[in-house]
Image (cartoon, rainbow, N blue to C red):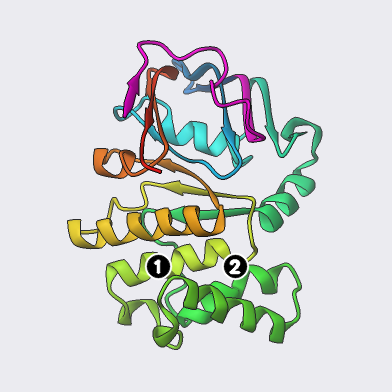
Amino acid sequence: MVLQLERAPAASRLEVAEAIVEARAVGKRYDTGKLEVHALRGVSFSVPRGEMVAIMGPSGSGKTTLLNCLSGLDRIDAGDVLIEGVSLGSMSDGERTDYRARRMGFVFQFYNLMPVLSAVENVELPLLVARVPAKEARRKALDALAMVGLAERASHVPDALSGGQRQRCTIARALVNEPAIVWADEPTGDLDSENAQEIVALMRQLNRERGLTFLIVTHDIAVGRSTDRIVRMVDGEIVGEELLGVR
């Protein structure tokens, strides 16, 4: 069943569950010198733990800006963002960086893999940066690659992997620190339809079987309809939601 809402409420209807992410009247603007652009205009919504939610809308609607602000990659100009009940605004730059390293995973459209490193070396890199002992980092990286079906390609560099395999490697890297939430910005945007379907199915499987929370920015309606909820944006505002009977 699909429930279509004409207008999103000030806060999500799913707040009855524990919210892992909560946006409270979030505003973001950019000053180009000649023009002040309001990228986000009083955005309020929440993501319950274990939900897989898609942010959709036309180019320039504020989707990626919202992801960057919610994850602490970008500062907000108004409102507040809470992650696991803690305000990002109350953290120093160092604390936000440390929190992202420990509790968040990121999946990007163009993979952002180090070309000279093998798959397992790419996956273990965030752990080594966080000063996890090398043997433990390698074990966790191999486990993460196995989780995404890439164990047999652990020693291959990115150029020796297909597009779908590279994205699986990126997902493994996002999971290696056992994050509270995974942020995915156009994760299928650089893939053909077959590989895109496989990546979406993998994220859905990880969500269902391991309870991982995913927030996905996407233009692809097929990706959106594989999630629990679609949040639609236009001109920096949330204008509607769809609850999907995926589960």
Q: Is residue 13 magenta?
A: yes
Task: Using the image as rendered, state which of residue 93 and residue 213 is in the foreground.
Answer: 213
Q: How many marks?
A: 2
| Amino acid type, residue under disc 2 in the picture | Val
Q: Crowding near pointer 2: few (<14 within 10 Å), some, many (20+)?
A: many
3D distance between C-alphas at marks 1 and 2:
12 Å
Which secondary structure is most common in the magenta stretch?
Answer: loop
The vertical placement of 57 against 201, above or below, is above
Query: Can the viewer see residue 76?
Result: no
The vertical placement of 43 against 111, above or below, is above
User: Regarding mark 2 in the picture, which secondary structure is present there?
Assistant: loop
> Which x, y percent locates residue 110?
36, 58
Q: Quadrant of residue 203?
A: bottom left
Which of the image's four quarters has the N terminus? Answer: top left
The vertical placement of 176 against 67, above or below, is below
> Which x, y percent locates residue 160?
31, 82
| Amino acid type, residue under disc 1 in the picture | Arg
Task: Using the image as rendered, state which of residue 52 and residue 139 is in the foreground.
Answer: 52
Which of the image's four quarters has the C terminus? Answer: top left
> Which label number is shown at residue 168?
1
Question: Residue at the spot x=69%, y=69% of the render?
Answer: 129
Dot 1 and dot 2 residues touching (CB under 8 Å): no
Q: Which residues are magenta?
A: 1-25
Task: Using the image as rendered, state which of residue 55 and residue 20 is in the foreground.
Answer: 20
Q: Is residue 193 magenta?
A: no
> Which x, y percent locates residue 170?
45, 65
Question: Residue at the spot x=25%, y=38% of the render?
Answer: 221
Q: Crowding near pointer 1: few (<14 within 10 Å), some, many (20+)?
A: many
Query: Can the viewer see residue 16?
Result: yes
Please give the residue where the numbered disc 2 appears in the rendered image. 176
> Which label number is shown at residue 34?
none
Question: Residue at the spot x=40%, y=62% of the render?
Answer: 111
